[in-house]
Image (cartoon, helix red, strand yellow):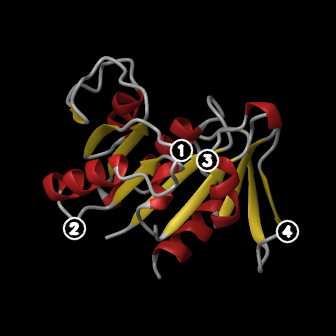
Amino acid sequence: MAIVVVGGSGRSVGKTALICGLIAAFKELSWTAVKVTSHEHWKVEPIWEEGDPAQETDTARYLQAGARRAFLLTAPEQRDPNETGLGLVMGEFFRSAGRGANVIFESNRVLYHLQPNLYLMVNGAEPDGQKSSFEHAAPLADALVMRAEADGVEEIAHSGVSAARPIFKLASFEQITPAMDGWLRQRLAR
């Protein structure tokens, strides 16, 4: 079982698009894809499973990309980093979805409640538009992903991080580059 988390520096930076690219590139893993939100959207239950890939939702986009199952988890954001609301919802999710599934989360907040096999951070927000969870999450990222005019990769050391980590620059988040694919396969095989 693999657990991957895709977080982001802000809203609308490409987290969902990157997850769709990962699902399409690794279809053999039969992903269960999960979007975590603090907004109630149109659902009132804390765990909702998407059943219709024709909808215009992020969870439907996961199914369109090839996810086996897609969920929306809702828990109000709390100021306490050890918030229990999301932890309780995640515990219920794992009981109902099964612990043997390969799961990919769209969230920074889940890092307070689990240790993923791989954590990717999409960086694209201006400093004043950054999520409050970004400051905690950024140093934990195994790799950064950014939009660019041309695909590329570089390694850079970051303050507070002991080892260099790659920065994958992608022209399209929906298409994983061969360099990123190879790096991901190596990391997921551990």
Q: Which residue is mark 2?
A: 100
Camera-near label (2 vs 1) is 1
127 relative to 89, above or below: above
The amino acid marked with disc number 1 is Arg
Looking at the image, which residue is at 32% across and 61% down? Answer: 102
SS category of the residue bearing label 2: loop
Q: Is residue 3 above or below residue 55?
A: below
Image position of 154 (left or right of 25): right
Asked whether disc 2 touches disc 3, contact meaning CB atoms under 8 Å apart, the reply is no
**Residue at the left extreme of this rendering:** 96
Of badges 1 and 4, nearer the viewer stands 1
Instruction: Determine which of the numbered discs, if any, sits on residue 133 in the image.
Output: 3
> What residue did someone put label 1 on?
79
Category of crowding for the residue at label 2, using alpha-carbon neighbours closer than 10 angstroms: few (below 14), some (14–19), many (at least 20): few
- Provide the residue designation for mark 4: 159
Per the model, the C-alpha gap separating discs 1 and 4 is 25 Å
In this view, the mark in front (1 or 3)? 1
Marks 2 and 4, the one that precedes in the sequence: 2
The image shows residue 113, relative to residue 107, as above or below, that is: below
Q: Crowding near pointer 3: few (<14 within 10 Å), some, many (20+)?
A: some
**Marks 2/1: CA–CA distance:** 31 Å
Disc 2 to disc 3, C-alpha distance? 28 Å
Q: Position of residue 46 (x, y in %)?
A: 25, 36
Nearer to us: label 3 or label 4: 3
